[in-house]
Amino acid sequence: MNEGRAPSPADTEKRKQQVLLCEVGSLLCGFALESVIETMRALPIEQVAAVPSFVSGLSIVRGQPVPVVDLPALLGVPREVRRARFVLVKAGDRRVALAVSNVLGTRSLPLRSLPELPPLLGSATAEFVNAIASLDAQLFLTLESGRLVPNSVWAELDLAGARS
């Protein structure tokens, strides 16, 4: 039994986290699979007054209104970037749709590499990060766990996926 024993470097090396990879313009983002409910084509959005500029409005998903966060706007990606897909994520006991350009699929990332990947909100403006944190702590925690995936890491993941 290994009870009470700290994991060895070899154990840590083998541990992986499943992530959903999405494109947001030229950025590649990874979301922990345990926070993802489903992905879908972008649905019609009803605009709502007095929301931050990175919130597109509400969309009806499975009969329920769900706020839509425009990830390209949040991350400072040019306005002309398509928002073709929604990633429905858990934010505490609620659901939030993240508008993204494309969903690439799932990959396993070694846990040891996660701290090395830049945080998703690292490219958002301080104003937007503060707005999310003050308006919705659960959404903030969900987005805070997201990561930007550099092209070099994507190439390794893509190669590993091709070998599987």
Image (cartoon, rainbow, N blue to C red):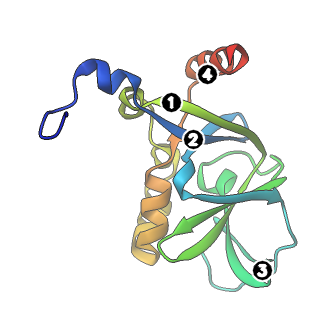
**Left or right position of 107 against 119:** right
Taking the spot 65% from the left edge, 54% from the top edge, the residue there is 71
Quarter assignment of residue 96? bottom right
Q: Are marks 3 and 1 in contact (CB under 8 Å)?
A: no
Q: Are marks 1 and 4 in contact (CB under 8 Å)?
A: yes
Label 2 vs label 4: CA separation?
11 Å
| Residue type highlighted by circle 3 | Gln
Q: Is residue 65 above or below residue 68?
A: below
Mark number for residue 109? Answer: 1
**Residue 131 can be seen, yes or no:** no
Q: Is residue 86 above or below residue 49?
A: above
Percent across and percent down for residue 109 are 50, 30
Q: Nearer the viewer, residue 132 or 52?
A: 132
Provide the residue designation for mark 3: 47
Label 3 vs label 2: CA separation?
30 Å
Percent across and percent down for residue 72 are 68, 51
Mark number for residue 157? Answer: 4
Taking the spot 69% from the left edge, 86% from the top edge, the residue there is 49
